[in-house]
Image (cartoon, grey):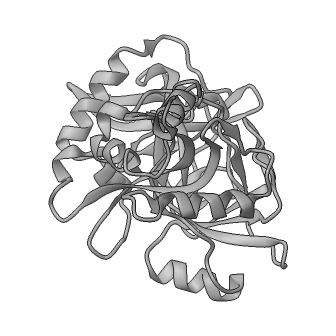
């Protein structure tokens, strides 16, 4: 007669590996919603990823189903320690220092890791567990299962923050964190959707932009040209000069060479006049610029949007290989 352990092993072998699902996404807002129906979580500044575990096999999958496992072996090892044979977790790959403060730039640059920084996985949702689909359950039920699942493991549970928005916002800001996600406590997990049941509130002006060209400067570039989609049109936002170290500049320039094109991808260039905070791109400037196919996405911080719909004091933070360029819009 088969033992209980043998029966359990047979049952586990019959459970199929969790498959990739396009993750649920939050809608950007200018103000956090309030009320008992909402919970609030930290918005981590890293790479969104699904962690799929079956036995000792772990796959880290980006928003676009790119396999990130080789890039983050420490996260793969951490996911192996959760108390489940088969599971699918939603979370964020984050580089943090000893004070728990994240850095997207450190996450991008492997040379900086290990110098007081570690790469961890903050899990905030549980989609499948031991072959059972949990996406239809209310958020708080999924999070309760997730918290229990990650206890004693090296995966970090990202739970609700205590207090009201008036208390949470200054606390998160003083901790140097990027923002806050508000979620309806009864919300189901709707795949491939930017939902009003999840709302993201950023404490600093920072978002993704599509690279549509650059200003050549000898064997490199002096600035990149960044934009966002308005429907099917790529709209120019500004030239970005700051944030490039020599290693990063060379690597980005090498990648942009593979995307060169003679066609300007921006629908609103040339500009009819120069901007108030600096030079714009006139008809005469267009011939000097090198255009690229809009396939690369960059994370960029900035001081403000001007009345002309352009960026002021933009700084390059890193590339976002996990983002689909067509989904990059102007966040309000």
Percent position of residue 233, x then y: 71, 27
Residue at image position (69%, 87%) is 166
The reply to whether residue 211 is in sight is no
Task: Work out whether residue 108 or residue 316 is closer to the camera in this orientation and state it.
Answer: 108
Percent position of residue 28, x then y: 71, 56
Residue 124 found in image quarter: bottom right
313 up-or-down from 257: above or below: below
Residue at image position (53%, 65%) is 158
The reply to whether residue 258 is in sight is yes
Percent position of residue 50, x then y: 53, 40
139 up-or-down from 165: above or below: above
148 up-or-down from 328: above or below: below
Task: Work out whether residue 122 or residue 329 is closer to the camera in this orientation and state it.
Answer: 122
Residue at image position (47%, 50%) is 300
How many marks the image carries: the answer is: 0
Question: Left or right: 202 with respect to 196?
Answer: left
Percent position of residue 272, x then y: 66, 37
Where does the C terminus fall, quadrant-wise?
bottom right
Residue at image position (42%, 57%) is 155
Question: Left or right: 86 with respect to 242?
Answer: right
Extreme-front residue of the structure: 1
């Amino acid at each position: 007669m088969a033992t209980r352990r043998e029966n359990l092993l047979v049952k586990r072998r019959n459970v199929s590996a969790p498959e990739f699902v396009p993750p649920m996404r939050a809608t950007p807002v200018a103000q956090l919603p309030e009320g008992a129906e909402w919970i609030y979580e930290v918005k981590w500044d890293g790479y969104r990823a699904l962690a799929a575990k079956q036995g000792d096999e772990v796959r880290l999958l980006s928003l676009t189903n790119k396999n990130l496992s080789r890039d983050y072996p420490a996260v793969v090892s951490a996911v192996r320690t959760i108390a489940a044979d088969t599971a699918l977790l939603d979370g964020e790959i984050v580089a943090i220092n000893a004070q728990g403060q994240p850095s997207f730039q450190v996450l991008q640059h492997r040379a900086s890791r290990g110098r007081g920084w570690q790469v961890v996985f903050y899990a905030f949702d549980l989609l499948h567990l031991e072959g059972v689909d949990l996406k239809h359950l209310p958020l708080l039920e999924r999070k309760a299962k997730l918290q229990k699942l990650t206890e004693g493991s090296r995966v970090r549970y990202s739970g609700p923050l205590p207090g009201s928005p008036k208390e949470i916002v200054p606390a998160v800001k003083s901790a140097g964190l990027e923002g806050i996600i508000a979620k309806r406590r009864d919300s189901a997990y709707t795949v491939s959707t930017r939902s009003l049941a999840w709302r993201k509130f950023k404490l600093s002006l920072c978002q993704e932009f599509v690279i549509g060209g650059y200003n050549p400067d000898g064997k490199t570039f002096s600035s990149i040209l960044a934009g966002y989609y308005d429907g099917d049109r790529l709209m120019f936002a500004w030239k970005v000069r700051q944030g490039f170290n020599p290693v990063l500049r060379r690597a980005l320039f090498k990648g942009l060479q593979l995307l060169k094109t003679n066609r300007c991808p921006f629908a609103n260039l040339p500009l009819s006049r120069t901007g108030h905070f600096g030079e714009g791109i006139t008809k005469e400037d267009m011939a000097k610029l090198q255009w690229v196919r809009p396939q690369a996405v960059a994370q960029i911080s900035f001081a403000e949007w001007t009345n002309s719909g352009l960026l002021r004091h933009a700084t390059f933070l890193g590339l976002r290989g996990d983002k689909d360029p067509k989904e990059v819009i102007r966040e309000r």
